[in-house]
Amino acid sequence: MSKFYAPLIAACAAAVLCGCQSVVDLVSPPSNPNPLAWVPPMPASVGPMTTTGNRPLRPDDRVEVSVQPPSQAHGFTASDTIDALGIITLPYIGDLRIDRLTTSEAEAAIRSAYVDGGIFQDVNVQVICPGMIQTQRVFVNGSVRKIGPIGYRDGMKLQETIIEAGGLNAYASGTVIVTRGGVSRAYDLDRIRDGKEENPVLLPDDVIEARESRF
């Protein structure tokens, strides 16, 4: 009886081993001299996050609006809370709706209201939402001189963020990994510096890891 089943058992064992080999082949990254080449691309942002990196303003957000003509004369700062209709009230122009805009978009809308309304020929506008800034950070780790969170600013970029973290330390390779929403992408800081690679705009909660050199 045992002689009858022996070939069958051997055949089953071989099939299982072949199956395991196939699974290993499926989950292993493809062979490539660049170990980072298989990293998937960063996901595209949607909505207002694409251009500014901030969530839209919304009712009950308190905003601080700084309005300053280039001449440094007659500038002012106003604070207001966005009401249920998405409106704030500003000197000289009155009510203006800014909900559903990011802070950068709100700055552009306020500037247009002052210039198009003939209040100022030109004006610099800054909109700050303290409640938003307190919760927005990027996180830097790896081969930098200062590891830890950095407060997020609208439009902040990778190269400048590494500088803000004290720059790369002596063990850094120059490769920096940005992880967003569980997806990672590698950047070469030397190529960014030379203008051969994009200097990406960061978003809140991005994780930046400066890779250590292997040598």
Image (spheres, grey):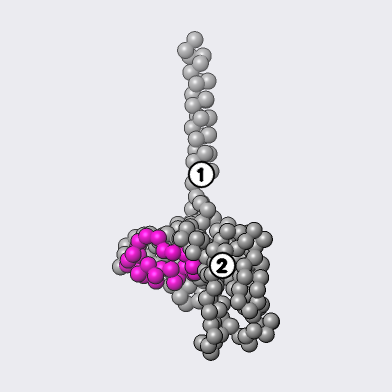
Residues shaded magenta: 143-169
Q: Is residue 126 magenta?
A: no
Q: In this view, which residue lies farthest toward the top? A: 1
Left/right placement of residue 105 relative to residue 193 reads right
Q: Is residue 112 above or below residue 85?
A: below
Q: Residue at x 67, y 61 (%)?
A: 85
Determine which quarter of the picture holds residue 212.
bottom left
In this view, the residue in front, 31 or 146, is 146
Q: Amino acid at mark 2?
A: Asp
Q: Is residue 154 magenta?
A: yes
Left/right placement of residue 144 relative to residue 79 reads left
Q: Residue at x 64, y 84 (%)?
A: 119
Q: Residue at x 51, y 16 (%)?
A: 5
Mark closest to the chain's N terminus, 2 or 1 = 1
In this view, the residue in front, 157 or 60, is 60
Residue 160 picture location, percent across and down: 44, 72
* Disc 2/disc 1 C-alpha distance (Å): 54 Å
Placement of the C terminus among the 4 image quadrants: bottom left
In this view, the residue in front, 203 or 11, is 203
Left/right placement of residue 34 relative to residue 143 reads right
Q: Amino acid at mark 1?
A: Val
Numbered circle sitting on residue 27: 1
Residue 108 picture location, percent across and down: 62, 75
Q: Is residue 57 above or below residue 4?
A: below
Find disc 2 in the rendering and name its residue: 80
Residue 83 picture location, percent across and down: 62, 61
Query: Mark 2 or mark 1: which is in front?
Result: 2
